[in-house]
Amino acid sequence: MRRPIQLALVAVGLALAAPAGAQEMGQGEANITATADVRMSLESGPRTSGDKLAQIGGLVGTKMGAIRTCYHEVTEERPTVQGEMRLTVDLASGGSVQMREDGVDDRELSRCILRELRRLDLGSLRPPGSAFVVLTFTNSAAEGVATTQERRAEEDDVTVTRNADGRFTAEGRSGNGHVKFTVTGGRRATAEQVAALQRSFREAIPVLLDCRRKASRLESPEGAITLRVTVNRRGRARIRVLRSTVPSERGSRCLNRFLPRQPFEAAAVGTHDVVIEFSHAEPTHTR
């Protein structure tokens, strides 16, 4: 019966479960960017005792530094690489290492790891005996890329509607709700232009929050500031304050000064109106 055994490999001094970027590396190891991690688990093959499995694990474990180096070199070019590899180590006929299943699907990584593991002196372990090795590759960079792509796809889906005047409009807000904004396109503006301007103001939310903070230094920031925003084909914007109900002029001056420094999507080209609302409630934290 096969018995899955998770090896910590403390005897050979390997912190296999520790993020590579957060531990000291020995000779031949590499510091993988972010919090990359390579984990190894073993499952015994036929006629393999626990002691023999531990011996195989200890020998394979000596190659973990080289395996991390393989992974580091691959993720420097392709940060989304992660997954599981399943290999067979068999002590028969002098020993062999074979790939059973490559769930990572990266040819360079699989070649590098097979090359390193096939350099093991398996003949130093007496047969019979075999083990199924599972190498799990994860890194925060890959997870971050995937999360960013998902979030970007979600954010790019801007809801654009028509107002009572038949003009396209879209809304946005900060995560804490202290700043809200409404983008209204010009008479001839398309839904795509309004969506592009909404995304541009969403990227500028840190500026809007800072202007709200400036407006609240001496009195309540509550109110709305209406802007006329003209975006050129190079993605630069000209800002003009049309009116404001915010008690302090600091908010308007801040927007007029810092918004033109922000990059705008060229797809938002044209002249549009934007209403920015500051709430009265104080933030629960500062950024």
Image (cartoon, rainbow, N blue to C red):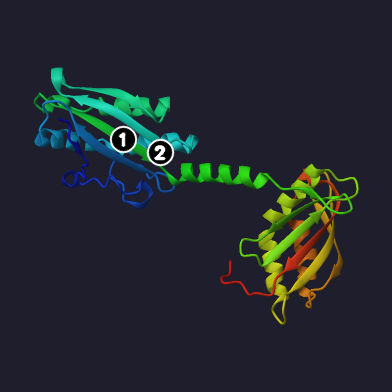
Residue at the location (76% across, 64% down)?
276
Q: Nearer the viewer, mark 1 or mark 2?
A: 1
Horizontally, residue 202 falls left or right of residue 29, namely right
Q: Is residue 286 left or right of residue 135?
A: right
Residue at point 27%, 38% (across, down): 40
Q: Is residue 234 visible?
A: no
115 vs 205: above or below = above
Tell me the kind of residue under disc 2: His
Q: Where is residue 165 shown, x and y percent of the image? A: 89, 53
Q: Residue at x 71, y 50 (%)?
A: 199
Find the distance from the CA under tag 1 to the CA under tag 2. Answer: 14 Å
Name the quadrant containing residue 67.
Answer: top left
- Three-letter code for the amino acid on which mark 1 is drawn: Leu
Q: Circle 1: is it few (<14), some (14-19), or many (20+) Cα within 10 Å? A: many
Residue of label 2: 72
Q: Which mark identifies residue 135?
A: 1
Residue 36 rendering spot, x and y as whole percentages: 39, 44
Q: Position of residue 59 (x, y in %)?
A: 18, 34
